[in-house]
Amino acid sequence: MKQKIFVIIFLATGLISCKSKKAIELRNVIVKQERVAFNILVGKGGAEEEKLNCLIKKDFKGALVATDKIEQEFNNIIKTIEALPTEGVKQGDELKKAAVDYYTGLRDMKNREREEIRQQEAGYDKDPEKASIAANKLVELNKEQLVMSGKVREKDEKLYHTLQQFEEANNLR
């Protein structure tokens, strides 16, 4: 009789503490994308480094090509997250949406740099009036970029809080 009770308690404890494999995989893939994004933006030999090296050399076409690479790499992150199954995972849809929103915001912010690159190129125009107009436009673009950075930071915070709620809901802490 004691053995039956022990077995039942053991099984019940095991079932209660079970963690959803789907939830674990969803979290792991989303967390891994943070590292992928980090490598795009600050990794050695990453697309952002390539863009900056081109700008230093005043290779504006090369910088635009590198910006295209950045966009494509962020699109890959977004597609990876969008393809994740969330059926049967508590708060899976919310986590997925927060991650897609964050990486979409990052991608869009980086895409806006195309216009900055064009204005930097125009700043080297031999016509002083065109160069001055480009410099003024660049200041305006920098102000817009600052606002966009704040919006991306908000999306990052939302992703962080959503991930915490997801982990609690799925007993992953």
Image: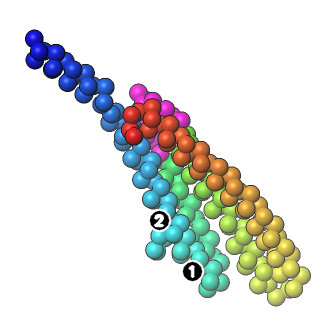
Residue positioned 16% across, 15% down in the render: 5
**Placement of 119 over or under 3, stated as above or below:** below
Find residue 39 and name its label: 2
Outermost residue toward the front in this view: 2
Outermost residue toward the right in this view: 129
Q: Give the distance between the C-alpha atoms of the residues marked 1 and 2, in whole angstroms.
A: 16 Å
Find residue 87 and name its label: none
Residue positioned 49% across, 42% down in the render: 163
Horizontally, residue 36 falls left or right of residue 69, namely: left
Q: Find residue 104 and report its horizontal and vertical position in percent.
A: 59, 51
Outermost residue toward the top in this view: 1
Q: Find residue 44 and report its horizontal and vertical position in percent.
A: 45, 74
Foreground of the two, 46 or 16: 16
Q: Secondary structure at mark 2?
A: helix
Q: Find residue 162 and report its horizontal and vertical position in percent.
A: 53, 40
- Identity of the amino acid at label 1? Asn
Foreground of the two, 62 or 152: 152
- The residue that disc 1 covers is 53
**Placement of 156 over or under 84, stated as above or below:** below
Magenta stretch: residue 90 in it? yes
Horizontally, residue 139 falls left or right of residue 1, namely: right
- Identity of the amino acid at label 2? Asn
Judged by depth in the image, the label closer to the viewer, 1 or 2, is 2
Q: Which residues are magenta?
A: 80-94
In the picture, residue 88 is in which quadrant? top left
Residue positioned 80% across, 71% down in the render: 139
CB of mark 1 within 8 Å of CB of mark 2? no
Dominant secondary structure of the magenta stretch? loop
Quadrant of the image for the C terminus? top left
Foreground of the two, 12 or 66: 12
